[in-house]
Image: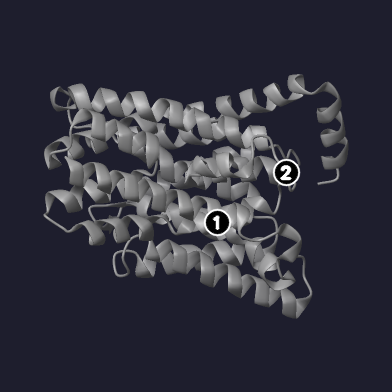
Amino acid sequence: MSVLPSRRHVGQQIAAVGLDEDFRRGFIQMIPLWPGVVAFSIAYAIAARTAGFGPFEIVAMSALIFAGSAQVAAVALYASGAGFIPIVLTGLLLNVRHIFYGLSINRWLPERTTPPKPVLAFFLTDESYGVSLRSFVAGRVSSLFLLGVSISLWIIYIPATAFGALVGDALPATERIGLEFIFPLTFVALLMPMLKTRVDVAVAIIAAALMFAIDGVVPDGASIVLVIALAATAASCSTALTGGPG
Amino acid sequence: MIERAGLIAVIALGTYVTRVVGFTLLNRKAIPARLDRALAYVPVAAFAALIVPGLSSDGNLDAVRIVAALLAAGAVLLTRQLWAALLTGMAVFWLL
């Protein structure tokens, strides 16, 4: 945080040069995740084809909804004959966690950002939130880094979805290769450097144990929201009592 | 076709709302200290929770995935690089 004012000052002075650099840095940091995105996109596109969605609809969902779990749930529910309202509510439930991410990342950002917050918000995902927050905590707060991270995911997701929608049927089952294991590994990599205090470690253990206990019992989407709310509240109460850092 | 297009539009809009409220609903200075303190722990709680479903295969915890995740954790602590963790984890996952 201590480097923030000077960085912002420099950023204003040399304008676009430094800003482009942050965007590029964010974009490149996400490239290791691309194989996982491609594998997921193809699996989603095949599921959507099977459910009766056309290629244009499949790609439109990736471009506009840009939330993998909600897309997969929507096409699966549509195929099972579920109604309009249940499908929409399930999609919303799967996305409620974004509210926490928005609140959390907004703590780091200045009041006005480039691009404006409603634009940054459109691209918010588990991965863009995580990778950006790690960079912010490490002392480099930049809304263009967040944009670079976000665009990097979006820009590969769309052609990969289109590829899956057009030729997915001819490909071997992508699940068997296991490329989607990249995502839990990503969160392992994001979590470890953030465990700095005993409270951090306790929160991580409580959150993982809670998730293990309720995953599959509570509907997907609700489980992660519950875990984040409970673990973060418990941590904030414990630090309030002990006067520890918060 | 119309129903699917409408469905896509409504889910897209709803998803955007969940993304934008956290960014814009609360003014940063208006956030109560208690909530702000809790928000400081959101990343750790979220990342830990997001790992868990990925460690299972067909509903059961998978030893190979757990070992791969642990070695990926070691790799990131040594190198501080995201790609090193992904490379280590995927290599272990494929080889075991």
Residue found at the very far front of the displayed protein: B2
Q: Is residue A62 above or below residue A82?
A: above
Which residue is pictured at 72% across the width and 26% down the height? A19
Q: Amino acid at mark 1?
A: Val
Which residue is pictured at 47% across the width and 53% down the height? B17
Q: In which image quadrant can residue A167 be found? A: top left
> Which is nearer the eye, B59 or A89?
A89
Q: Is residue B21 above or below residue A109?
A: below
Residue A138 spot, x, y in % from top left: 72, 42
Residue B47 spot, x, y in % from top left: 52, 53
> Of helix, strand and loop, which one carries label 2?
loop
Q: Is residue A112 visible?
A: yes
Spatial CA distance of label 1 from label 2 is 16 Å
Q: Amino acid at mark 2?
A: Arg
Say few, some or many: other residues with alpha carbon within 10 Å of mark 1 (under 14 / 14 to 19 / 20 or more).
some
Q: In which image quadrant can residue A39 be found? A: top left
Q: Chain of mark 2?
A: A
For disc 2, the marked residue is A112
Which residue is pictured at 37% across the width and 46% down the height? B12
Q: In which image quadrant can residue A3 be found? A: top right
User: Is label 1 in contact with label 2 (beta carbons under 8 Å)?
Assistant: no
Say few, some or many: other residues with alpha carbon within 10 Å of mark 2 (under 14 / 14 to 19 / 20 or more).
few
For disc 1, the marked residue is B21
Residue at mark 1 shares a chain with residue at mark 2: no
Q: Is residue B64 visible?
A: no
Residue A126 spot, x, y in % from top left: 48, 47
> Of helix, strand and loop, which one carries label 1?
helix
A72 horizontally vs A135: left or right: left
Q: Quadrant of the N terminus of chain B?
A: top left
Q: Quadrant of the C terminus of chain B?
A: top left
Which residue is pictured at 55% across the width and 69% down the height? A231
